[in-house]
Image: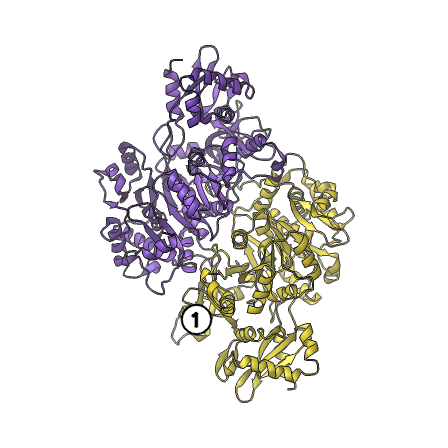
Chain colours: A yellow, B purple
Amino acid sequence: MSFRAALSAFRPTPESIPPPNVNLTLPVPAGLPVHIHPLNPLEFLLRGAQIYPDKLAIAHPDVPYPSFYTYAVWAQRVQNFAYGLIQAGIRPGDRVAVIAPNSPMIADAMQGAIGARAILTTVNTRLTKAEVDYILEHSGSKLIFVDHEYADLVKGAKVPVIVCSDTGRAGDAYEEFLSAGRRSSRERGWQGLEMDADENAPSCLNYTSGTTGRPKGVLTTLRGTYLAAIANAFEAQMNKESTYLWILPMFHAAGWTYPWSVTFSFSTQITLRTVDNTLIWKHMLHSAVTHYCGAPTVQIGIVNHPHAKQLTRPVRAIIAGAAPTAHLLSELEKLNILPVHVYGLTETYGPFTRNYPQDAWQSLSAAERARLSARQGHAFATSAPLRVVHPLADLPPGTAPGTLLDVPKDGKTVGEIVARGNITMLGYFKDQAATDHAFEGGYFHSGDLAVWSADGSVAIQDRSKDIIISGGENASSLAIEQELSSHPDVLEVSVVAREHPKWGERPMAFVLLHAASAKKWAGKHAEFAADLKRHARGRLPGFATPEWVAVVKELPKTSTGKILKTSLRKRAALAKL
Amino acid sequence: MSFRAALSAFRPTPESIPPPNVNLTLPVPAGLPVHIHPLNPLEFLLRGAQIYPDKLAIAHPDVPYPSFYTYAVWAQRVQNFAYGLIQAGIRPGDRVAVIAPNSPMIADAMQGAIGARAILTTVNTRLTKAEVDYILEHSGSKLIFVDHEYADLVKGAKVPVIVCSDTGRAGDAYEEFLSAGRRSSRERGWQGLEMDADENAPSCLNYTSGTTGRPKGVLTTLRGTYLAAIANAFEAQMNKESTYLWILPMFHAAGWTYPWSVTFSFSTQITLRTVDNTLIWKHMLHSAVTHYCGAPTVQIGIVNHPHAKQLTRPVRAIIAGAAPTAHLLSELEKLNILPVHVYGLTETYGPFTRNYPQDAWQSLSAAERARLSARQGHAFATSAPLRVVHPLADLPPGTAPGTLLDVPKDGKTVGEIVARGNITMLGYFKDQAATDHAFEGGYFHSGDLAVWSADGSVAIQDRSKDIIISGGENASSLAIEQELSSHPDVLEVSVVAREHPKWGERPMAFVLLHAASAKKWAGKHAEFAADLKRHARGRLPGFATPEWVAVVKELPKTSTGKILKTSLRKRAALAKL
């Protein structure tokens, strides 16, 4: 059934239907001059409901009870959500948690929390119960929305919990919450809500999924969300004809602000509960998908799926989390998937830089083009420019503390990427010490080590802790991975440091083989290792050639799909080789 | 010669060439928190110079001395401009005037004034000397840039004048100014300039070309310009592949903020000194133009030009100033020119609303579709929502002064369009009384009378002074013009009120005929009048049918292409009929 047919067949709850002649504006806060109104990303949805009320806003097709909402209906549900929060006693600035895969509930929460001026804490569904407990406790969330599949994660919670069965039908506790919100509003509508007069008020509280230590709570602002969302919509060239496929979890850095890029551009969004490549290809081929976001590891799964075939319309893949390899870029392009390589962190609202392809690259070799495309590029239009500075620990003696010295733009000197301005977080929640540390010298310190080219483009070499000091030389694990991934049998590879009696450290590669290659090399891993090292020697300096190669069945990953190098380092240390 | 060839052949002055490894960032003002940087539209140009240094930024081809600048070179010239201002003693907040047609100088000034934190006063080249004197005096401009063709307009000026010969070559006084600016900078570059810490600081001073009374000086802000420019780039779907043709004068409401939409989107701009339809068609057909702005009267000239032919690539025409007629819309579409109908005033940075076409319109008749397309629509994404309110003069007795009461969204009740927020001016320069009056009730009063539809779309009926009170009924001159323009012989038409002994007022139509039609009706204007009235009677109520019809050879227009209804009213009053 087409989405159009499904939309007309689906009956939202009666409380989801807006009253006639609804006023789709938020009241202007009193006391502001005529020439200013506070930047507020919820306004994008209200415009969508006003201008394209009958356009499909959310399609949630691949579940036992599919649901489909137009912009007008969705806006009403978001309003109900806001009133539901207020009725539950949520006050401006209070935290509200949501634990859910991509689904209408979390999409509602992204918008609705702003309506009630609450701070939304999205919790990663892949965390352990202890981690979830910590985040709920640390955030001081007063109300929890949880998807039925993850209800166990909040068992014993000390605050009210609303379990959503993801049905969109009456009888679902989440629908009851929305309907009660509508009733409590007594049809005051948007006019009964308040817009924050301070555009720098906190908007979301996004916990990092750091590979080490406690997660930190990143506070974003309304202004930052507004400007980051516009930048993302512009960089991805989204418009009313776009269909955005939610592969990236919305709980990951508030979905990189795409929940508001989608409403800014009046796009349709399709919510996928899991990264299921069969479903992804179904929608790529049959649901007019034009955009999706994902880390390279997600993209690898997509290009290698048996249903993969060249798309008749171009699809833009926004890639972040690590640099795409040359091999991946060319595989994507073969399928008519146009890569938009971006970079960022939870602290920068997700992406805040982009690799801007140049016309002149067309005349270069595929390898050279891929090398240039893998750079993290330049800051977005609505960000302040980034800098690459000498790591604070490495400053010459006598330098004033917190001094930021740019590294030369020589494409060689390694420094740390620092950022500031409208697409940099407000700070870490309840952690002034960590905030002060991260903001030393008036810039946010990313922890990512990069070189800066004469053209202003940055290229990440590694997280500071991922650099391999081999024979006194700094070897970038990322650069090694880039080269190893060009070996035809390699599907995915991760490289970490391992202690070496002579050289201090030497690189160790963990390799996942293509299915066919795994058969070919079965029982012959030593031969494969030799072959891979031969491949590497022609491409890398000696100190960067992997000393050890382990063929593995899977690579350990964080809940957001990043390879867990800490875990690989432990395995490397214990491995008998 | 192609632009690419022309660009490589052209030699900018030595001082236009940036030094190697230039730092293309403005210093961050001290004292701001890490999560905020002031919105500043000059940053877009600096990004262009950083990311696409060799891309053609400005082509100025149709002059005795053509010039062509890449983004890198243009940015250096803009920097030189800023230093030139500082060297000339211009301090932050000082006014600087520019009197020029579309040309590199005025494009430089739009950006360069921000670099020196000066307020740019653009002066309409079509004004009389007395009007120019008034603006120069009222603005208190301390320095004047004037294009050689308009040097007479500033004869006897009491402040320094720089005459630009529009050559881009050494020996041109303007080039000397830029070169001296570069020398005075002593290569401190962008780092020697200051970014305004206050994003609400004034940016431009744009004088209205009101049809009555003294021009008023509209102050815009950096924040407003930044957000309006992004909205315009988004609504027009501009990107790196776009080429913007300057038909709209840049001196008109600061070119509707397109000078910064172009840099935001890394587009190429072509500067045309005059509205020359032969040149326009040359560039439409051969210079890869993708976008231009213009009032309907300009569009009429374009579609009726002998060189007009269907374009192989779509061109977006951003239309404002009056609603396009059904006939015009269909003529544009035949040529593959896609109309984007926007509306605004100098006080709203030019456009701040847009007609958002709906998929459902496809199934309507051409006439009905045109009627819907002629509505002014909804406010831009970065504007606050607009309202239509009962005119303050018409409020029920006892209502508190300044109360704004929305008219019902019935598509019938006429009210005034009011606006506020980030795309509304800071105020009128040195005219607190006019500012207070315009901002009564906390909204800017546009003076445009409109109806509000249930879908939130506004449709202008008239400027308040253009309404015709015929037999006690309010007849919209605009609605009458829309209907008369559907007569096959009518090229352009304007309708005004004329006194009538019985009905108070009755409509009088001034008609410009198509060239072929003028021959057909030569010597038979009375017959044509009868024919037009017959045409009108089926389409308009009796009180709105024109009582008188005058066939004219041209319609009087303001310097910005608006039809001068004041002048037509005078002619109507004097006409013997």
Q: Residue furthest top?
A: B502
Residue A36's place in the image compared with B559, above or below, is: below
Identify which residue, B389 or B568, lies in the foreground: B568
Residue B175, how many percent across, how many down?
A: 26, 52
- Visible in this render: residue A95? no
Q: Residue at x 68, y 38 (%)?
A: A186
Res A141 quadrant in image: bottom right
Residue A503, how many percent across, how many down?
A: 52, 86
Q: Please state the total of marks drawn on the protein image.
A: 1
Identify which residue, A326 or B378, lies in the foreground: A326
The answer to whether A410 appears left or right of A9 in the picture is left
- Visible in this render: residue B14? yes
Q: Residue at x 25, y 42 (%)?
A: B148
Q: Residue furthest bottom?
A: A502
Q: Residue furthest right?
A: A171
Residue A569's place in the image compared with A116, above or below, is: below
How dense is the environment of label 1, judged by Cα within 10 Å: few (below 14), some, or many (20 and up)? Answer: some
Residue A185, how many percent across, how many down?
A: 67, 40
Q: Which residue is mark 1?
A: A411
Res B555 quadrant in image: top left
Chain to which the residue tagged by mark 1 belongs: A
Residue A452, how many percent across, how many down?
A: 44, 68
Q: Please state which amino acid type lies under the numbered disc 1.
A: Gly
Quarter of the image for the C terminus of chain A: give it.
bottom right
Residue A478's place in the image compared with A132, above or below, is: below
The answer to whether B106 appears left or right of A523 in the picture is left
Q: Residue at x 68, y 78 (%)?
A: A520
The local secondary structure at tag 1 comes to: loop
